[in-house]
Image (spheres, rainbow, N blue to C red):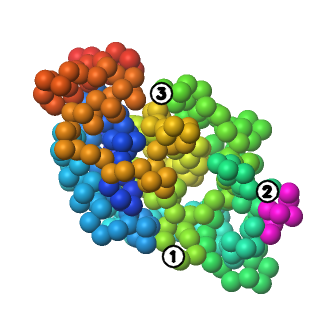
């Protein structure tokens, strides 16, 4: 049974040290937890070991500590939870909501070309459904969520669930509420289609791992960067299919480079400089539309000020 008490989390991927954009997400999630007098957890999302250099997780935890963002429980690592992901995948398989896929990247590219879906920057192309009705002699490589099947039978799917869904689906359009962005909508079949749950290399996919982890940790509120907004419908559907609780979502502003691109490790974002933690926190606060504090302010006082302001901005009930 889920606890009604607020439980939030910051879940970085240890592909390198935190950068300025990472600190914005960390600070936002910490402030929201403190504003609700709740718990704040840190989860290291090392689900893809080849991309995670040794020691990056330690550096991340040190950076958070230097900025006064200390989790209320010991950190957890996704790499230690594979058995839970396997159980969730088996549940979807038993419900015929997961199917094997034998497609290589080349197969999918060929199908996209045949469908006239050319690559466009920042635009995700949905799985073309090549193995939806069987492998056709191919060897199974991965497992996919039967998203289109689940959406097409939505009234029946909804009736089978004990808890009401915090979203609606009408004619394939899924609508949900974001605490900052308001009403959001997406056609998941057009954005992702039947997305991967377990990859060809045997590793579990992010979408499956994150919903399982949020349920295991009783996460009630997810506060993260708005670049992850498009993932929310997939996670809502997976939660519903697995009978898991639905956290409340809030997506925060991103730090952007001069050309408008999101600041990221992929684009060469430098590691977060925590030699002066208050300076780094001030920059993150400004991105969150919070006022900067004067250099003489202690870090503890700065964080306390921002918590109070956060309560007012996001209508967090006060004691």
* Left or right side of 147 for 314: left
| Disc 2/disc 3 C-alpha distance (Å) | 34 Å
Q: Which residues are magenta?
A: 110-116
* Left or right side of 197 for 210: left
Q: Which mark is residue 202?
A: 1
Rendering coords of residue 268 (x, y %): 45, 54
* Label 1 SS: loop
Q: Give whichever of discs 1 and 3 has the lower sequence position.
A: 3
* Label 2 SS: loop
Image quadrant containing the C terminus: top left
- Which SS does the magenta portion mostly show? helix
Residue 124 visible in the picture: yes
Q: Give whichever of discs 2 and 3 has the lower sequence position.
A: 2
Q: Nearer the viewer, residue 70 or 97?
A: 70
* Label 3 SS: loop
**Residue on which disc 2 sits:** 118
**Residue on which disc 3 sits:** 179
Residue 125's place in the image compared with 72, above or below, is below
């Amino acid at each position: 049974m889920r606890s009604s008490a607020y439980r939030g989390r910051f879940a970085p991927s240890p592909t390198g040290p935190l950068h300025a954009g990472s600190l914005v997400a960390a600070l936002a999630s910490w402030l929201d937890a403190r504003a609700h007098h709740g718990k704040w957890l840190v989860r290291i999302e090392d689900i893809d070991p080849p991309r995670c250099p040794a020691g990056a997780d330690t550096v991340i935890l040190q950076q958070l500590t230097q900025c006064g963002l200390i989790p209320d429980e010991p950190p957890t690592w996704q790499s230690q939870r594979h058995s839970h992901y396997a159980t969730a995948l088996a549940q979807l398989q038993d419900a015929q909501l997961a199917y094997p896929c034998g497609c290589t990247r080349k197969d999918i590219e060929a199908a996209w070309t045949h469908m006239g879906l050319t690559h466009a920057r920042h635009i995700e192309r949905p799985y073309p459904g090549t193995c939806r009705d069987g492998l056709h002699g191919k060897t199974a490589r991965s497992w996919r969520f039967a998203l289109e099947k689940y959406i097409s039978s939505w009234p029946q799917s909804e009736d089978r669930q004990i808890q009401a869904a915090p979203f609606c689906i009408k004619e394939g359009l899924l609508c949900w509420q974001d605490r900052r962005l308001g009403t959001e909508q997406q056609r998941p079949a057009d954005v992702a289609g039947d997305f991967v749950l377990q990859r060809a290399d045997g590793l579990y996919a992010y979408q499956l791992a994150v919903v399982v982890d949020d349920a295991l940790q009783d996460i009630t509120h997810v506060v993260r960067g708005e670049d992850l907004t498009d993932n929310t419908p997939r996670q809502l559907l997976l939660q519903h299919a697995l009978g898991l609780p639905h956290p409340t979502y809030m997506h925060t502003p991103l730090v952007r480079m001069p050309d408008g691109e999101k600041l990221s490790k992929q684009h060469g974002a430098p590691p977060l400089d925590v030699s002066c933690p208050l300076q780094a926190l001030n920059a993150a606060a400004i991105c969150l539309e919070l006022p900067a504090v004067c250099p003489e302010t202690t870090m503890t006082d700065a964080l306390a000020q921002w918590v109070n302001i956060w309560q007012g901005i996001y209508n967090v009930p006060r004691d």
